[in-house]
């Protein structure tokens, strides 16, 4: 839990320094507990909003966000595969090898164009700034290099529909 707090404090500092608004998409059915967790960290330091999972479609929300920050959620991988600028922050791999970026694949380094294990303000700031300012064609080049090894998106389940039609 301490790793979560450290990452969130760094994100809050970035949001404050850049006069941004942070939207936190909740994931737990007990939204009040989750909301209070974030409220205790952010307090009145930054402009932020908690989006209750029951009231917001996660795909719709991520698809309309400028940058998505995640700690290795499946939604993060899905977001990246759909072409969203998604950053994976990994404060856990020092303690658990099954959460490193791209697991179970082992061909990814500890740091890359949109992921890192180095949890520091300067490193996270550089990742966000680089991804935010990256031309779409360059981002797509990086994304395409990795996404098929991570989670390939099949729009409208065309492959599944083709298999089902064969039976």
Image: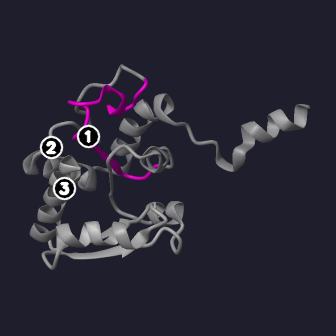
Q: Residue at x 35, y 69 (%)?
A: 33
Identify the secondary structure beneath mark 2: loop
What distance separates the C-alpha of mark 1 from that of mark 2?
A: 7 Å
**Which contiguous range is marked in magenta?**
83-104
Query: Which callout, 1 or 3, points to the residue nearer the camera?
Result: 3
For mark 2, does the 10 Å Cα neighbourhood hold few (<14), some (14 to 19), or many (20 or more) residues? some
Estimate the x, y position of residue 89 in percent, counting from the top left.
26, 44
> Do we see residue 116 in this rendering?
yes
Q: Residue at x 42, y 53 (%)?
A: 84
Query: Which callout, 2 or 3, points to the residue nearer the camera?
Result: 3
Which one is in front, 23 or 139? 23
Which one is in front, 98 or 124? 98
Residue on which the image places disc 3: 5
Residue on which the image places disc 1: 90
Residue on which the image places disc 2: 119
Question: From the viewer's perspective, is residue 50 above or below residue 146?
Answer: below
Residue 20 location, quadrant: bottom left
Residue 109 location, quadrant: top left
Predominant secondary structure, magenta span: loop
Please say if the residues under marks 1 and 2 sit with CB atoms less than 8 Å apart: yes
Q: Residue at x 36, y 28 (%)?
A: 98
Identify the secondary structure beneath mark 3: helix
For mark 1, does the 10 Å Cα neighbourhood hold few (<14), some (14 to 19), or many (20 or more) residues? many
Estimate the x, y position of residue 157 in percent, counting from the top left.
71, 45
């Amino acid at each position: 839990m301490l790793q979560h707090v450290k990452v969130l404090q760094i994100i809050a500092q970035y949001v404050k320094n850049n006069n941004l608004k942070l939207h936190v998409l909740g994931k737990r059915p007990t939204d009040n507990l989750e909301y209070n967790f974030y409220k205790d960290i952010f307090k009145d330091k930054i402009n932020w909003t908690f989006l209750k999972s029951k009231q917001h479609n996660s795909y719709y929300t991520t698809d309309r966000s400028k940058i998505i920050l995640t700690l290795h959620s499946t939604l993060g991988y899905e977001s990246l595969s759909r072409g969203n600028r998604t950053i994976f922050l990994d404060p856990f791999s020092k303690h658990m090898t099954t959460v490193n970026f791209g697991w179970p694949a082992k061909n990814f380094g500890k740091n890359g164009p949109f992921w890192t294990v180095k949890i520091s303000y300067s490193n996270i700031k550089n990742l966000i700034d680089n991804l935010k300012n990256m031309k779409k064609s360059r981002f797509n080049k990086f994304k395409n290099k990795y996404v098929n090894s991570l989670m390939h998106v099949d729009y409208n389940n065309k492959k599944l529909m083709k298999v089902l039609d064969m039976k």
